[in-house]
Amino acid sequence: MAESRPFPDQPGPADRPPPGTAPAWPFVGRTTELAAVRSALLDARAAGVIVIGDAGVGKSRLAAKVAADLDPERNLVVRAKATEAAARIPYGALAHLLPADRAPASGARLLPDAVAAAGRRRLVLALDDAHSLDPASAALVGGLLERGEARLLATARTGSGLPAPLAALYGNGTLHRLELGPLGHAQTVRLLEAVVGGQVEDAGARRLWRVAGGNPLFLRELVLAGMLAESGGVWRCAAGPPLTPRLRELIEARIGAVDDEERLVLEYLALGEPLCEAMLRELAGPDAVARVRERQLVTAAPDPNGRRRQLRLAHPLYGEAVRAATGPLPARARLRRMAEAVEGTGRRRREDVLRVATWRLDSGGETDPGLLLRAAWLAWSALDLELAARLAGAALHGYLARPGRRPGGAGQAAALLATVLHFADRDEEAEAALREVAERLGDDRERALHAGARGLVLAWGLARDRAAGEVLAGAAATITDGAWRRHVLALSAWVALFAGRVPEAREAVERARAQGAAPPAITAETDAAGALLDAYGGLADRAEATVRARLADVDEWRDEAPIVQTTLAHARTVAHLFAGRVDAGLAAAERGLELVKETGRARIAASFSGWRAQLHRLRGELEEAARWSRDGTAKLAGRPAMFAGLCLGELACAEAQLGRAAAAEEALDRAAALARPAWHGVDFSLVLARPWVLAARGDDAAAVAAALAAAEDAERHGLRGYAMFALHDAVRLGAAGTVPARLRALAEGMDGPLPPLCAAHADAAAARDGDGLMAVAEGFERLGTLLYAAEAAAQAAGAYEAVGEDRPAAAALARGRALAGRCPGARTPALAALSAPELTARQRQIARLAAQGLSNREIAARLDISMRTVGNHLVTIYERLGVTGRDELAKLYQP
């Protein structure tokens, strides 16, 4: 397991600020706002701009950046800051800018030194917290602006109001007013990565963004408090947030002083938000609710049905601070009162079931296990793994605690608990829960749910594939209810498919469908397995049709089989991948990540990161592919897990195609320790990566052999899409050979524009057909697979050169270079011809190895030639490329 290290509270020694101070944060992520404020300030039709925003949102930093970027030869910037203390003193905010002999009655003479010093330059008054200006200073600033003697660059807090002179200028259009909102998610990611100097996990960045509410000040305090830690080269978000004294002070300052009644309102919301306003008024009193609303400590919005107004705390961190300050006994009392209030209405909406069960559980009283189990299903439906596990565990305990009675719901509770624990990477606990009720199972429903959960835990969690097969087969043979036998068979298909046993999986799906009609959830499970089979088999259109049909009735089965949603997103993503519809595939992968949200610590989230990497690599965006691969591997936390081969295989492949052989080999080594045989089908990227790692090491012959072996492996397991990729990789590596017929046969049975293009590439490469290769390059470019296009153009240049067609060769070379330039950092064997067309294929191979630092002896051993031959080739290489040795050669071949 990779060692984690927290974010340091100080930068390196060279950049360390004075003791006791925190490091300054970079100004990142406000490019659009920066341009807007600058444009408004310099607008000749106005007298300046006021930036309005909440405390901590970054308005002062933004204004300071605008001021600092102004040309000092054309602008004189004078700075002032208004404060509540200075607001009681006439001209208090501007005292440092006024002459010592100023007289209040001679307003026209005030600020003469600054005006005189400006000369022909524009005088810019940078004024922070303009809402706190004293009346005299406000009148002075208003006069300067009216007379055109200065421009204003001011900040003010939202909701505080502007002094009358400035409000009047804004009202008549003399001043611009720009609202500065919180940072967006993408802006937050850029800021965090600039701060830590590395990649931040996507789910972690989203969580920090949500917790901080996009407020840079809160974000800074959370990071300095240790909410980010580095593991395996990626910064991940801790469970937190940690309420440090400094952060608590900031939050309490934002909330301000509250009386006991107002605090009661905040406590109810902190423990149960969102709450119906009418119910909250009954619990805490209408006057107190009105006061906290007036103070903007809460926000109001209609519920999803638009019938009731729901209240929330105005910022996510308010709840953290209020909960921390609420004692355990008062908190339990509040929870019981909220549960009683909802139960008293007689309503039983699905969200009410979940909330009441959670409140009852957290209040410490005895709770009906049936209510807890229904709520656990709802939490599982939302893929809230932590809450679902707590509720299902409590339900199981409640059923088992009934002495002398058969615990009728224990089997269902244990199956649900085990399923949730499995997807939360707690498989040993899942197996223990299933063992606890193994002798207490009742009807077919309980036995089917138990067998299905145990099959997933054994196959996917504990790497006991054979045992999983026996459990599922035994259940299918003994369960008499056709619908529940279909459930077991559908999960058998999932297990077989993920292991790469496609014929077995297809047989299980056919047997499942032969059982007849079934409830919507079981039908969805069966169809999801069928969609996966079609997707990996290259039948993208049929897979997409199945996905659409099942998502059309998602409301009928989501609560019972929520994981099917992610499975359908999985099927849709890989279907588009093998069809070559990259944009659609990326959209499907993004949808999958949205489903898991911040529960992205579950292994299922790693899969969508891995598939995003595949799709970016297909588009030639190798650095982005490596980034998403690392995002996925970070979720594995250094443990053997599902999707380890997918993520690490994609990382190895991207690193190898970027020319970083050592990093690629390291990823393969990690994959060998973390990947599981039960995931051979889904983790096939690991097999596809090996040829490219060999190629990065310069062993082209072994790379081609590995690609052809990968194709045979994929075909043997029924993975037609991966077989296509493997065969096409052999073409890209310069060995079309017997590949064309095999690729044509595959393409005939696959959907989408990519398979026929790959087959055409093989045909043209085998025939050394320059025109055909250029046509293929154009096709790949239209498809958006730019790396494929660049490689095909490079191969076309070689084909033209071989028959002495210099002009077409030069055109193909130029086109290939232009395409390769749109794939930053790409270093594949085919592209080597673009950087060194003067060399033969053997010379390029030797040059790549020498650029990696291999000695003549090592190159000779690698290529099975003599050291003298290597030396002679290197002399020719240096002469033709105009370099003097290995160091300069490395600059040509390394990223």
Image: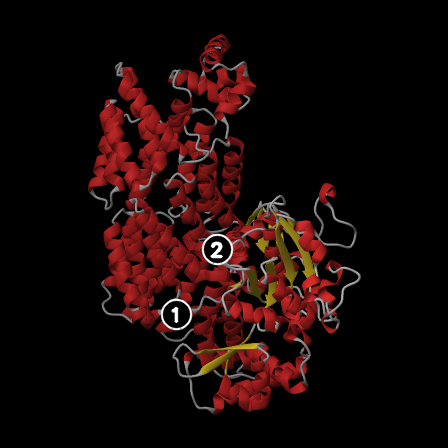
Which structural element holds mark 1? helix
Q: Is residue 384 above or below residue 367?
A: above
Residue farthest left in this picture: 748
- Disc 2 residue type? Arg
Report whether residue 824 is seen: yes
Instruction: Indicate the quadrant where residue 257 lies.
Output: bottom right
Residue sitting nearer the eye, 164 or 655: 164
Instruction: Indicate the quadrant where residue 323 lies.
Output: bottom right
Residue sitting nearer the eye, 560 or 455: 560
Q: Is residue 152 left or right of residue 672?
A: right
Which structural element holds mark 2? helix
Residue sitting nearer the eye, 790 or 293: 293
Q: Is residue 765 left or right of residue 379?
A: left
Residue 287, percent from left and from top = 58, 90
Q: Is residue 785 left or right of residue 321?
A: left
| Of labels 1 and 2, the one closer to you | 2
Residue 200, percent from left and from top = 55, 51
Report whether residue 435 is seen: no
Mark found first going from the N terminus, 1 or 2 = 1
Residue 859, percent from left and from top = 50, 18
Q: CA distance from mark 1 to mark 2?
A: 26 Å
**Disc 2 target residue:** 603
- Disc 1 residue type? Arg
Residue 793, percent from left and from top = 31, 28
Q: Is residue 434 left or right of residue 497?
A: right
Q: Is residue 501 above or below residue 151?
A: above
Instruction: Indicate the quadrant where residue 84 lies.
Output: bottom right
Q: Residues within 10 Å of mark 1 (few under 14, many from 20)?
A: many
**Disc 1 target residue:** 447
